[in-house]
Amino acid sequence: MSLRLVLVAAAALVDADHRVLIAKRPEGKTMAGLWEFPGGKVEAGERPEQALLRELSEELGVETETACLAPLTFASHAYDAFHLLMPLYVIRRWQGTPQPREGQELAWVKPNRLRDYPMPDADGPLIAPLIDLL
């Protein structure tokens, strides 16, 4: 059985205190209540970097540029209904203050505390490279 491949781009926004921004999925969405790195699905004809810039603007009201996206690692995870491929980009420069525009909760978290927040299975393996980097 082959699973549909879903490409999602995710961001680790890192502030001056080396904390990472995570967002709690709101009620009514799949995996509600779990914490994740901001980002979203790559639409047809979009590059992952374009999708991430769009999603950060829509979800958080922050703007950045492709040159500010530093690829760090990726997740490849088979869920029951689809296979997720998710590159994670580190972003240290952006304009605007992140705001929860889609009903999500936001938290700035030290990398070594990220495991204290329940996350979707695909997000867990992204934590170790962030700890190593920061």
Image (cartoon, rainbow, N blue to C red):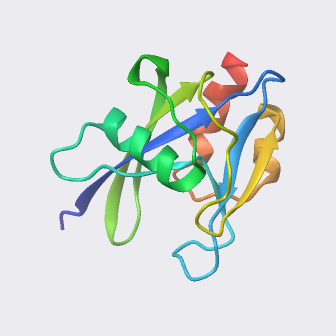
* Image quadrant assignment for residue 25: bottom right
> Residue at (53%, 76%) from the top-left corner?
29
Residue at 60% from the left image edge and 34% from the top image edge: 12
Residue 54, quarter of picture: top left
Q: Quadrant of the N terminus?
A: bottom left
Q: Quadrant of the C terminus?
A: top right
Image check: 29 left or right of 119?
Answer: left
Q: Position of residue 74 (x, y in %)?
A: 44, 34
Q: Residue furthest bottom?
A: 28
Q: Is residue 93 left or right of residue 7?
A: right
User: Compared with residue 46, is residue 74 higher up or lower down, i.e. above or below?
Assistant: above
Q: Is residue 21 left or right of residue 87?
A: right
Q: How many marks?
A: 0
Residue 38 percent coordinates (x, y): 56, 48
Name the foreground residue: 109 vs 80.
Answer: 109
Where does residue 108 sit, x and y in percent of width and height?
79, 42
Residue shown at 82% from the left, 34% from the top: 110
Name the residue at the front extreme: 96
Residue at figure coordinates x 58%, y 59% from the top left: 120
Residue in front for this viewpoint, 78 or 105: 105
Up the image or down, 104 lies above or below 126; here it is: below
Name the spot of residue 3 as percent of width and height, x first.
Answer: 23, 63
Determine whether, in the image, residue 3 is placed left or right of residue 8.
left
Q: Is residue 46 above or below residue 78?
A: above
